[in-house]
Image (cartoon, helix red, strand yellow):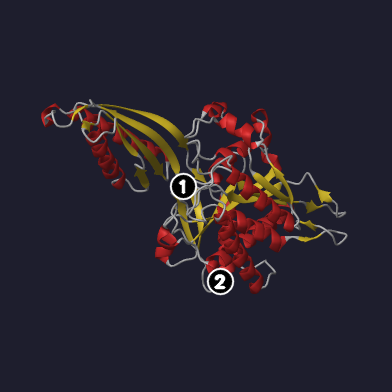
Amino acid sequence: MAALLQTAPDTVAAAARRVMARCDELARVSATAGGIERVYLSPEHARVNRLAAQWMREIGMTTRLDAAGNQVGRLERSTASGAPDLDAPALVLGSHLDTVPDAGRYDGIVGVLMGLEVVRMLRVPGPDGTGWRSPLPFALEVVAFSDEEGTRFGKALLGSSAVAGTWDPDWWDLTDADGVTLREAFAEFGLDPGRVGEAARRPEELAGYLEAHIEQGPELDERGESLAVVSSIASARRFQLVVEGEARHAGGTPYDRRRDALLGASEAALAIERVCRAEHHVIGTVGQLEAYPGAVNIVPGEARLSLDLRGEFDDARDDVWTSIERELDVITGRRGLRWHAREVHSAPAVFCAPLLQDVVREGIVSTLGRGVDDPATIFSRAGHDAMAIGSVTDVGMLFLRNPDGISHHPDEAVSAGDVAYGTRALAESVLQLAADRAVSAG
């Protein structure tokens, strides 16, 4: 596949250095000392939005903060007369700037910054020599989504769900750890809850969505490859499980009279691992486990645990949940306990559009060359904003190698060399899509 991007290698290397430096700069915007934590509608959210807007304007984009707190930059395409085509659909490049607690500095962030560098590479001067335009059959937008992780309110993909037009009014009553509701946080941030629907985009406004992201897994690293085409994003379900027993004196209660909720929950966590390990491409994680009343000399009367369940296909994921339910019935029945679950999140698997898979593949091949004619195609076990955006437009994704697959951790990493490859491949993908559009129109 011949390269379409007319950009010197040193220009791409400079773009990668800029991405890496800005990842470091954004990492200093944190609610915690000695770590990285930025949550939705926080002062840190506002600060990184201002930085992103500044960088967008530096490359000639117009900027706006949408009604859900997402930072948006747009580069208009030109009409035949050279005037900006304000009605042109936009190809959106993006990812997110929020983080989990004690985060790494690349998850989401690198995708936003690579999108900006792609715009820098592809823009052309306006007709009078001032300003910048998209030379493509669509406008270019970069979106820094505001809440992919769901750290503050326990509901992921809030920002991208608003853009997709799938905002649920029930979310307004979600609360953070301090009891602040989502509605209250909106108002405190300067947003109007009554206008959140204005963030929604219509299908005819969009030419598609491309997201670059670190893999958050070890497959590329194990294969010794820099980049991959993403075929789909795993389906996900999240539950809060409660195991109920009886709190009694630790010293005075013999084992045959104990109804220890913590031991039941611990056995349940091991059963979840056993069930999921037996199923290809289904992953279950117990990330939280708490015992109540939580005293050293009391047999726990209640235990609460979380379950994050992900699978490549919805039906396989749901079959695993059914198996887990049966296991919990057996465990709690044997131990004289009760259990119940509350589902707090559900998202179907999202498949990347065949055309966008093709252009990403072509972008990788034209970038890496040297006999690379069949780059890796893998599905994402992690969730991404593309999951939400897939309900309003076609989506495609490009993965970058993540050494040892470490993510959601301070040791998360990506190399400047892979960022350079990825940025060029993303730009090539955009040009390949534009060429396809031109052929289709002709």
Asked whether residue 431 is in view, the answer is: no
Residue occupied by mark 2: 369
Neighbour class for label 2 at 10 Å: few (<14), some, many (≥20)? few
Q: Position of residue 300 (x, y in %)?
A: 24, 31
Q: Quadrant of the C terminus?
A: bottom right
Q: Position of residue 176 (x, y in %)?
A: 49, 34
Q: Which mark is residue 337?
A: none
Q: Which quadrant of the view contains residue 267? A: top left
Q: Position of residue 295 (x, y in %)?
A: 26, 33
Q: Give the number of the mark in front: 1 or 2.
A: 1
**Residue drawn where x is 65% and y is 60% of the image:** 117
Asked whether residue 224 is in view, the answer is: yes
Q: Is residue 132 left or right of residue 395?
A: right
Total of numbered circles in the picture?
Answer: 2
Q: Nearer the viewer, residue 93 or 375?
A: 93
Q: Earlier in the sequence, mark 1 or mark 2?
A: 1
Neighbour class for label 1 at 10 Å: few (<14), some, many (≥20)? many
Secondary structure under the numbered disc 1 in the rendered image: loop
Secondary structure under the numbered disc 2 in the rendered image: loop
Q: Which quadrant of the view contains residue 10? A: bottom right
Q: Amino acid type of disc 1?
A: Pro
Residue occupied by mark 1: 101
